[in-house]
Amino acid sequence: MSKKISVFLLIVCTVFVFAQEQPKKNEPFQQPQLSHPDSWTMVVVPDVQAYVERPRNHGIVELMNAWIVDFQEPLRIQQVLFTGDLVFRNDQKVPTPNRYSLVSDEQWRAFSRMMERLDGKIPYILCTGNHDYGHMSSENRNSYFPDYFPTSRNPQTRKHLVSCNYNAFGFTTLENSAYSFTAPAPDNRKFLIISLQFAPTDSDLKWAKAVTDKFSDHIGVVLTHSYLAWTGKRLETEKYALNKQGGNAGEAIFQKLVYPAKNIRLVVCGHIAAPDKWERGIAFSMDKNSSGKSVAQMAFNTQAIGGGFHGSGGDGWLRLLEFLPDKKTVKATTFSPLFAISPSTRHLAWKHDERSEFTFTLEP
């Protein structure tokens, strides 16, 4: 084959692939809907630190939360999971990096105000990330998180709370917490969601294992901030002080908690990201546990999409998990209420690549 023909074919293939990936403005827009009326939904909200850091981005979280409330009934939303890094920095004594950023106490207050839209309306579960501890990124276990999100904060969440572990200072907080709920009819399966703080300690994992054993008739879901790399492989080491002080990374969480637990079937995390590289903040993998059952592991973090780490905060993307009535199939889709709000941008509101739209199975 001549060099000219080879180059021509390469150009044609590239144009074809690019055209396949681009959303089409003339395609009819459709808001998310259940593929079966008996399905139900769990929503995953990626790291919000870049939204919270800058006041100009606050409205995007408000929009995301308002959309969740609006679609609570149509999508039969049962739980909303936040993947951590709720603020950009935790210690208010550290100077702000630039004039556009809020100091940390203002960030916590801002995020707290945003979550008022969900309070009393829908259960939401938060996990803490590296930016929620220390001076800027997990130098120590100090966090304002318990001050703004006590166990009594949201009655819709509180009614599902079944256990809390002690934090580093001897208080029971939502930093390590477990929630039980029953899926709506006709599903009626029992689920247990365990939220683990960033870099959970051996004590945290021991507590979590005891909870999963106690609720052995529940399908276990682990929510933790840092777990998967963008390749789908679990993180074996991390650079943070808390990891060096005994905090476990992804592979250790799997070996000490997920693998030996007979009923954990899903792990959800955030943390990973690269400026405007979609594939670097999204990951999915399946592995077997000690009982030979498959465990789905999912990373979803779009904080660096929309202008990098200090851009829009993530373009409003949500991960929607639809649990079908066959009691095994879960459909994952990726949707942005931000793009969906205007007719001029609705063609951008769905992600259709293989990392953003897929189906997996939760074994009984």
Image (cartoon, rainbow, N blue to C red):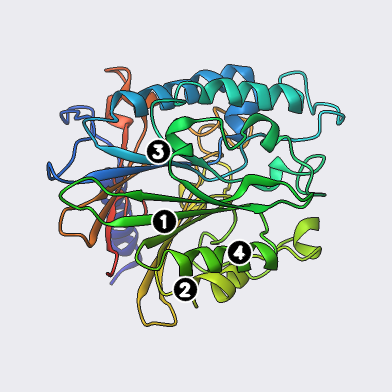
Q: Amino acid at mark 1?
A: Leu
Return the x and y of residue 176 as percentages of the image width and height: 61, 52
| Sequence-wise first label, 2 or 4 | 4
Q: CA distance from mark 2 to mark 3?
A: 28 Å
| Whether residue 35 is visible | yes
10 Å neighbourhood of mark 4: few (<14), some, or many (≥20)?
A: some
Q: Amino acid at mark 3?
A: Leu
| Sequence-wise first label, 2 or 3 | 2
| Sequence-wise first label, 1 or 4 | 1
Q: What residue did someone put label 2 on?
A: 261
Comparing 224 with 15, the one in front is 224
Mark 2: which secondary structure?
loop
Determine the residue positioned at 47% across, 73% down. Answer: 261
In the rendered image, the vertical position of residue 313 relative to residue 172, given as above or below = above
Q: CA distance from mark 4 to mark 3?
A: 30 Å
Mark 3: which secondary structure?
strand
Mark identifier at residue 192? 1
Return the x and y of residue 356 as percentages of the image width and height: 35, 49
Mark identifier at residue 318? 3
10 Å neighbourhood of mark 2: few (<14), some, or many (≥20)?
A: many
Q: Mark 2–mark 4 contact, CB under 8 Å?
A: no
Return the x and y of residue 181 as percentages of the image width and height: 36, 49
10 Å neighbourhood of mark 3: few (<14), some, or many (≥20)?
A: many
| Sequence-wise first label, 3 or 1 | 1
Q: Amino acid at mark 4?
A: Trp
